[in-house]
Amino acid sequence: MTYVIAEPCVDVKDKACIEECPVDCIYEGQRSLYIHPDECVDCGACEPVCPVEAIFYEDDTPEEWKDYYKANVEFFDELGSPGGASKLGLIERDHPFVAGLPPMNQGH
């Protein structure tokens, strides 16, 4: 089990969650952030600090955003387990599911 970052993060990427994560397992893609399923220790520190409520425990992800679990896992198929997001910085790609989404309204 792991935490999942869903649609509210796309094109927002607030990054408050990155600052809270004690194991540096939240990686930054082009349009969204992703939680590494093997590096996440399920501490839950990221969830309450997300200002757009995009982070869910895997089993609690709303039905309409279930595809984000797969996107979070598959985003790391090529990367493997780098053992920390901060040393990679921005990863110049997204999971195809996220990359194919229309631009999200920022609301700011």
Image (cartoon, rainbow, N blue to C red):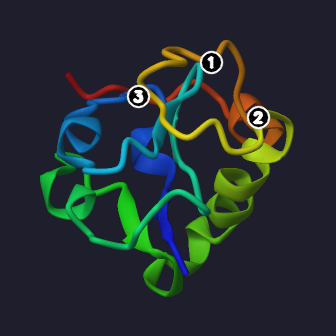
The disc at residue 105 is 3
Horizontal side of 60 relative to 75 (left or right) equals left
Q: Nearer the viewer, mark 3 or mark 1?
A: 1
Secondary element at image label 1: loop
Q: Position of residue 19 (x, y in %)?
A: 20, 36
**Rendered view: 81 above or below 100:** below
Q: Mark 2: few, some, or many residues within 10 Å (few <14, many ≥20)?
A: few
* Residue 15 lies in quadrant: top left
Q: Position of residue 5 (x, y in %)?
A: 47, 54
Residue at 52 percent across and 78 percent down: it is: 58
Q: Position of residue 16 (x, y in %)?
A: 19, 37
Q: Label 3, label 1: how many angstroms apart (C-alpha)? A: 22 Å
Horizontal side of 102 relative to 52 (left or right) equals right
* Residue 64 lies in quadrant: bottom right
> Which quadrant is the N terminus positioned in?
bottom right
Q: Nearer the viewer, mark 2 or mark 1?
A: 2
Q: Label 2, label 1: how many angstroms apart (C-alpha)? A: 10 Å
Is label 2 in contact with label 1 (beta carbons under 8 Å)?
yes
Residue at 71 percent across and 57 percent down: it is: 73
Secondary element at image label 2: helix
Identity, as a three-letter code, of the amino acid under mark 1 = Ile
Residue at 74 percent across and 62 percent down: it is: 70
Residue at 48 percent across and 36 percent down: it is: 84
Identity, as a three-letter code, of the amino acid under mark 2 = Leu
Disc 2: which residue: 79
Disc 1: which residue: 91
* Chain-order first, disc 2 or disc 3: 2
* Chain-order first, disc 2 or disc 1: 2
Q: Position of residue 90 (x, y in %)?
A: 53, 14
